[in-house]
Image (cartoon, rainbow, N blue to C red):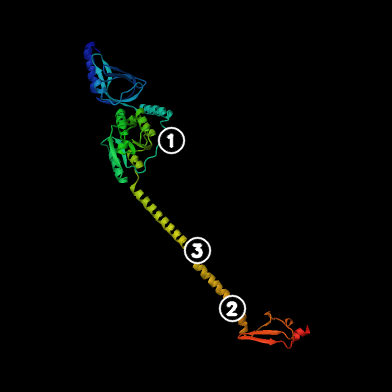
């Protein structure tokens, strides 16, 4: 190749050409998965190295953008960077200009495990500390973003299940490094729980990535929830998501709507239960009335049997029976049949001839009077004579 045909540049021209080439041939915005190394603040700008272990590149967050970031990375944090190439033609220096930085899942899970371990060792995360939820709360506080689909679902579910409960909605930010704001709101609300008649608190956030839920792994925030003056129910993210806030709450629900379901009874089920209890109570009362009525009847019968009039009637009946018996055994009955009673002068009854001798004076009693007779002769029967 002829030297005359090769393009000739000054250093500035070469660097400018390289910059133009990069600008035309590379995406204006891109996502970069990396680990932060040696972040440093210089004159309000955040300088850092982004690496994946095999290669590295410089990065910068300008002061104007740094003030807008909700997450400030630390050394060793895994991050997802929304950035663009930044090429300084004067020095042919290439870096990543970060427009946004978010923690990667590995960083979120690492922080989750760290905070959980600390709170478990201190006994803050302990199943024995969990409190029972109120059965039919009159007033509950709902902390979530406003407006949001999660809030709309919770309000609709509460109206369907138990419209008697008042929901006090307290708006909070739920995205990014907003833990200080949530903590301030919780502290302010804790001082007014008695005044507002609050019986439970719901901390809710709709769907999102696990990285979006990192704020609910904040150690200070979780300590406040663990010691809150009223029971706390969390409904954060999706069913598979688990945060430290879920571990310190008195009840962890899979979703915001499930949190309302856990707190509020189903009015239709409660009505059915009341009807069943009413039926059982009515049956019990009827049974009690029947038993008491039978008991009173038994007592009335016993009282009747022990009454003086009944005793007199019974004794009269006995006397009548004895009178009939005496009447049946009375000598008068035999006398009326033609028989007679014989007695001596002394009034002793004569039942055989051995008691009589010639000359005895006898009284013969008959049905209509008495005869006086004297024994002139004694004649024994043939059987007695033989013997």
Q: Earlier in the sequence, mark 3 or mark 1?
A: 1
Q: Which residue is mark 2?
A: 327
> Which is more toward the observer, 68 or 93?
68
Q: What residue do we see at 77% from left, 85% from top?
A: 385
Residue 228 percent across, percent down from the top left: 36, 33
Q: What residue do we see at 62% from left, 86% from top?
A: 369
Q: Which residue is mark 1?
A: 128
Q: Does 141 sit above or below residue 107?
A: below
Left or right, 326 with respect to 221, comes to: right
For the residues marked 2 and 3, what is the alpha-carbon distance in whole angstroms? 34 Å
Q: Which numbered circle lies on residue 365?
A: none
Q: Secondary structure at mark 3?
A: helix
- Res. 24 image quadrant: top left
Q: Earlier in the sequence, mark 1 or mark 2?
A: 1
Q: Does 382 sit above or below residue 285?
A: below
Callout 2: 10 Å neighbours few (<14), some, many (20+)? few
> Is there a contact, CB below 8 Å, between mark 3 and mark 1?
no
For the residues marked 3 and 1, what is the alpha-carbon distance in whole angstroms? 60 Å
> Which is more toward the observer, 62 or 223?
223
Residue 318 percent across, percent down from the top left: 55, 72
> Which is more toward the observer, 100 or 286?
286
User: For the residues carrying marks 1 and 2, which lies nearer the camera in this image?
Assistant: 2
Residue 255 percent across, percent down from the top left: 34, 38
Q: Which numbered circle lies on residue 302?
A: 3
Residue occupying the far right of the picture: 386
Residue 8 seen: no
Left or right, 327 with respect to 353, comes to: left
For the residues marked 1 and 2, what is the alpha-carbon distance in whole angstroms? 92 Å
Q: Earlier in the sequence, mark 2 or mark 3?
A: 3
Residue 142 percent across, percent down from the top left: 30, 37
């Amino acid at each position: 190749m002829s030297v005359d045909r090769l393009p000739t540049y000054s250093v500035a021209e070469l660097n400018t050409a390289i910059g133009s080439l990069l600008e035309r041939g590379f995406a204006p915005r891109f996502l970069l998965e990396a680990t932060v190394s040696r972040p440093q603040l210089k004159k309000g700008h955040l300088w850092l190295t982004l690496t994946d272990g095999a290669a590295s590149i410089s990065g910068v967050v300008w002061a104007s953008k740094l003030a807008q970031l909700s997450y400030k990375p630390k050394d060793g944090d895994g991050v997802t960077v929304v950035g663009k190439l930044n090429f300084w033609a004067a020095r042919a220096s290439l870096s990543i200009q970060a427009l946004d930085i978010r923690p990667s899942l590995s960083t979120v899970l690492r922080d989750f495990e760290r905070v959980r371990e600390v709170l478990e060792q201190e006994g803050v995360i302990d199943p024995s500390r969990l409190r029972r939820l109120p059965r039919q709360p009159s007033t509950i506080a709902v902390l979530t973003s406003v407006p949001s689909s999660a809030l709309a679902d919770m309000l609709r579910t509460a109206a369907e299940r138990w419209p008697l409960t008042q929901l006090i909605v307290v708006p909070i930010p739920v995205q990014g490094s907003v833990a200080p704001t949530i903590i301030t709101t919780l502290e302010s609300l804790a001082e007014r729980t008695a005044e507002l008649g609050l019986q439970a608190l719901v901390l809710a956030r709709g769907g999102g990535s696990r990285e979006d839920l990192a704020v609910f792994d904040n150690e200070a925030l979780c300590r406040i929830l663990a010691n809150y003056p009223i029971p706390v129910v969390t409904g954060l993210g999706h069913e598979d998501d688990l945060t430290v806030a879920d571990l310190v709450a008195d009840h962890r629900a899979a979703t915001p709507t499930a949190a309302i379901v856990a707190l509020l009874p189903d009015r239709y089920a409660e009505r059915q239960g009341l009807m069943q209890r009413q039926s059982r109570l009515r049956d019990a009362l009827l049974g009690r009335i029947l038993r008491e009525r039978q008991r009173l009847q038994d007592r009335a019968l016993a009282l009747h049997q022990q009454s003086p009039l009944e005793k007199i009637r019974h004794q009269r009946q006995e006397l009548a029976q004895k009178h009939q018996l005496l009447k049946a055994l009375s000598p008068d009955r035999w006398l009326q049949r033609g028989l007679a009673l014989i007695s001596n002068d002394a009034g002793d009854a004569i039942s055989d001839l051995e008691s009589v001798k010639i000359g005895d004076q006898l009284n013969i009693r008959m049905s209509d009077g008495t005869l006086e007779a004297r024994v002139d002769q004694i004649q024994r029967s043939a059987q007695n004579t033989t013997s």
